[in-house]
Structure formats: C-alpha cells, structure tokens
Image (tube, rainbow, N blue to C red):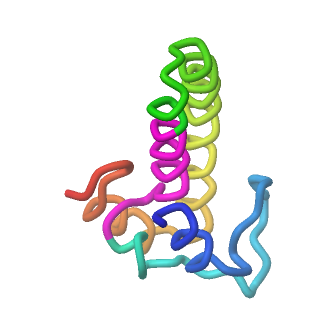
Amino acid sequence: MLFFSAHKHLNENWSPIIEKKFSKSRSLILEGPYRYIRHPIYVGSMILLLGFFLLSANWLFATIPLIILIIFYSIKIPLEEKELERNFGKKYIEYKKRTGGFFPR
C-alpha cells in the first residue's frame, strides 16, 4: 500500500529518470507518505521484497534482489536528493530536516 500510495501522490511528478531540469509543472510533494519519509517508493519496494522472501523461504531469491536494490538505491538516492535541492532549494533542505529518508523522525 505504501508503494502505491506514494506513486499516487507523485502523480505526474513521477519520472524514472533523474532529470537535469524539472518542467514548470513539477512541484515538491509534501503530503501522503511524503509527509513522513522522503523515499516511500523505495521503502515500499523493500517491503515487497521482504514479503516475496517470506513467501518463497529461499535465501538466494531474496538476497540477490536485495543486493541489487541496495546498490541501485545507494547510487540513485544521492543523485535524486542533489537534484531536488538544486530545484527546490531551501524548501527541500527544510523538508529533509524534518523527515527521515526511510523511517519517520
């Protein structure tokens, strides 16, 4: 539910590509799950992976995707946050101070 709720709140602001310039219609989303954490889609995907692991009970099927996601997120998240700071400035910096990346503060 977290994953789908986060996508719903992003609406047209979601993009699979870290863009150098956001279009004028883009805005900083501060509602829904984004009120509490900055990366609810990533948290939701990790919860989905945990559920898959529990259902499969196979360490190999859970470990490989987990390692891939950790590597992917450790590269993508800093790039996204840098771009968000560049585009939204103080508003995003203040948002970062009051929200956790993966867990609510």
9 vs 78, nearest the viewer? 9
Residue 63 position within the rendered picture, expressed as x and y whole percent measured from the top left: 54, 17
**43 displayed left or right of 7:** left
| Residue 61 position (above or below residue 43) | above
Q: Quick one: quadrant of the C terminus?
A: bottom left
Q: Image quadrant of residue 23? A: bottom right
Q: Quadrant of residue 3?
A: bottom right
Point out residue 6 in the picture as x, y percentages from the top left corner.
53, 69
The residue at the point 31 percent across, 67 percent down is 36
Q: Residue furthest left?
A: 105
Residue located 44% across and 32% down the image: 54
Return the x and y of residue 52 as percentages of the image width and height.
Answer: 54, 36
Residue for point 38% across, 50% down: 101
**Which stretch did the figure color magenta?**
36-51
Q: Looking at the image, which residue is at 43% across and 78% down?
A: 30
Q: Residue furthest top?
A: 60
Membership of 19 in magenta stretch: no
Relative to 26, does residue 51 appear above or below in the rendering? above
Residue 46 belongs to magenta span = yes
